[in-house]
Amino acid sequence: MTPQPVNLAAAFASFDGVYAPRVAAELNGQMVKLARIQGRFVMHSHPHEDELFLVQRGELLMHFEDGPTRTIREGEFIVVPRGVRHCPDAHEECWVLLFEPASTLNTGDVGGELTRDAVPLAISTDEAQL
């Protein structure tokens, strides 16, 4: 099978719901996840995994338990090192690409009712290439 490019606008348009990540790709034990973020999530950490947040659309606030809040704008990314307690937040809907190990739970060490399995992105190859 020949690899195909993914159109991010079409991919994000293919699903609704905030804090419900979709798996867009997998490589070397890592997942590329797409998530819509709006509102404040839970403060949590990932004891064994680093996490990269790349903002595709909007503005993301990343609150840190032991440090200042950082603002990540469109076209910017931030890496949250393993073990660092953080809390994603967005006043308006924000589209984020996440790069993280396949084992990473969205709620990290906290768990709870906001925990979501990352489901495969349901988009056809034709739609993804728009």
Image (cartoon, rainbow, N blue to C red):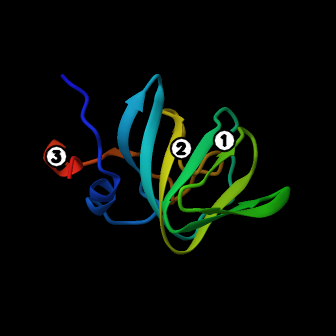
Could you tell whether 2 is left or right of 22 in the image?
left
- Name the disc covering residue 105, or none: 2
Could you tell whether 30 is left or right of 89 in the image?
left
Picture coordinates of residue 68 (x, y %)? Answer: 82, 62
Q: Tell me the CA gap for discs 2 and 1.
A: 8 Å
Q: Earlier in the sequence, mark 2 or mark 3?
A: 2
The type of residue carrying mark 1 is His
Q: Secondary structure at mark 1?
A: loop
The type of residue carrying mark 3 is Ser
In the rendered image of this protein, does residue 78 appear above or below residue 63?
A: above
Q: Residues within 10 Å of mark 3 (few under 14, many from 20)?
A: few
Q: Quadrant of residue 35?
A: bottom left
Q: Tell me the CA gap for discs 2 and 3.
A: 26 Å
Q: Earlier in the sequence, mark 2 or mark 1?
A: 1
The type of residue carrying mark 2 is Leu
Of labels 3 and 1, the one closer to you: 3
Could you tell whether 43 is left or right of 104 in the image?
right
Q: Residues within 10 Å of mark 2 (few under 14, many from 20)?
A: some
Q: Secondary structure at mark 2?
A: loop
Evaluate whether residue 42 shows in this view.
no
Residue denoted by label 1: 46
Pointer 2 and pointer 1: residues touching (CB < 8 Å)? yes
Q: Residues within 10 Å of mark 1 (few under 14, many from 20)?
A: many
Residue at image position (34%, 46%) is 119
Q: Tell me the CA gap for discs 3 and 1.
A: 32 Å
Picture coordinates of residue 65 (x, y %)? Answer: 80, 58
Of labels 2 and 3, the one closer to you: 3
Residue denoted by label 3: 124
